[in-house]
Amino acid sequence: MKAQQRRVWISSYLGTTIEYYDFLLYGSAAALVFGPVFFSQLSPLLGTIVALATLAAGYVARFAGAVIFGHYGDRLGRKKVMLVTMVTMGLCSGFIGLIPSYAAIGVAAPLVLVVLRLIQGLAVGGEYGGAVLMASEHAGVRRRGLAASAATMGAPSGAVIATGAMTLVATMDREALLSWGWRVPFIASFLLLALGLWFRARIEESPVFLADVARETAPVQRRSPIVELLRDHGGTVTKAVVVQLASYTGQGVFGVFLVSYAPPLGYAPPLVLLTIMIGTLGSVFTTPVYAALSDRIGRKAVLIFGTVANGLVAYPLFLLINSGVTAVFVISVIVYLCFFMTPVTSVSAVMLSELFPTEVRYTGVSASYQLAQTVGSGLGPLIAASLLAAAGGTDTTLIAVYIGVLAILSLAVLLRMKETAGTSLRSTAADPTPDVDSAQPPVGA
């Protein structure tokens, strides 16, 4: 079983890395080349705006993907859905690299681009929940947090690889970049897809799913998972989203909003991007550390630390950023991304899987995560920019207060939640089979 667990962890990590590479690669390309390639009939500024609008469309589709793929993941199995999401994302990204320009086929080019982007959003919306569940449902109670962190590590890994790939091709001369250079990272998705499928096809279906759902001796009439989730577990979904808000908002503010806020302070844009990329890469290594710690001391302790840290460091972090000292800026942002943002993002994955019963777990994990991502990382930069404008364009106090208020809300919910570490993921009372490796004592024993 240990060999199978390792295979599952590698599959979850690689799958999520590839999916987020494909999804986030689009963002760099949208800002860099999609305007002149697919919207050349518009002015350069308007073309860039429209290209970024297609980027936003993918984020809107993520929640829909969480519901759609969550439905089938809870009904048909985790593995089947994960294979579908990986193939869908890989093919869409590869095909984006093959779309002729607007100059070649006219309005069909941007239309195909938007359609593929929407399908990408659907796929990535269903990927995360499946990757988390396959890892956590194959693991024993003693190492479930560490196992689930494999999926969490994939998102920043994919972001770093995507940023690095587009940075590399951006060094080409403008004509080569626009004609074929930008296409290379997208077409490479076909190769990454083959690699991911090789690992993912060799893993076994979740033993928890097989025990609780697939092995039912009599058919059970159930509502749609999303209906059942909202009707019977709506409060849990709300709590799960609120618990993650402060951290994901901090991620959006100090990982995205900072790209536009820092340059006017005297920091070169390449330095800002490099700093964020280093901090993101560092979070890949601190994620399993915090996740493993949660296996030893409990989920709540790590989540509370991360939530309180986000609320307390926001204001002093802005003071350090506003200092104008390059070394202070670089160190403070990297430290935040590695050590203060990561406790919640690393543990929320396994915490979500322990909050929902098997029959709605895929939908619950996916929907809760995507909602928190949308409100936190998605709307966070926009809200931060609006608060900055309301304060005259220079005072970041309101932004820090906003993060602090979210931290208070998250903390209030956390303090009322029960500890989930060490609990069984099995929902079927009639099935006495314990979790994998559950003969080992739970956390705190």
Image (cartoon, grey):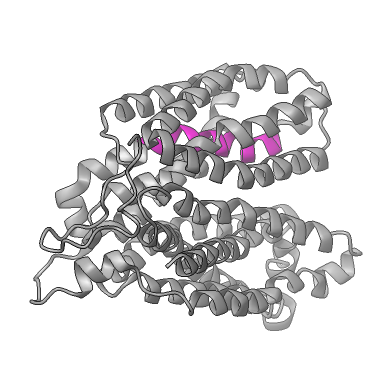
User: Does 72 sit left or right of 162 as displayed?
Assistant: left
Q: In the image, what residue occupies the spot 82% across and 43% down?
A: 270
Q: Quadrant of residue 300?
A: top left
Segment colored magenta: 243-260
Q: Quick one: 363 or 9, which is closer to the camera?
A: 9
Q: In the image, what residue occupies the spot 62% across and 62% down?
A: 21
Above or below: residue 88 compared with residue 35? below
User: Does 293 sit left or right of 206 as displayed?
Assistant: right
Q: In the image, what residue occupies the spot 39% across and 22% down?
A: 408
Q: In the image, what residue occupies the spot 26% across and 51% down?
A: 424
Residue 405 shown in magenta = no
Q: Quick one: 211 or 109, which is closer to the camera?
A: 211
Above or below: residue 393 compared with residue 337? above
Q: Is residue 421 visible?
A: yes
Q: Quick one: 121 or 332, which is closer to the camera?
A: 332
- Dominant secondary-structure state across the stretch colored magenta: helix
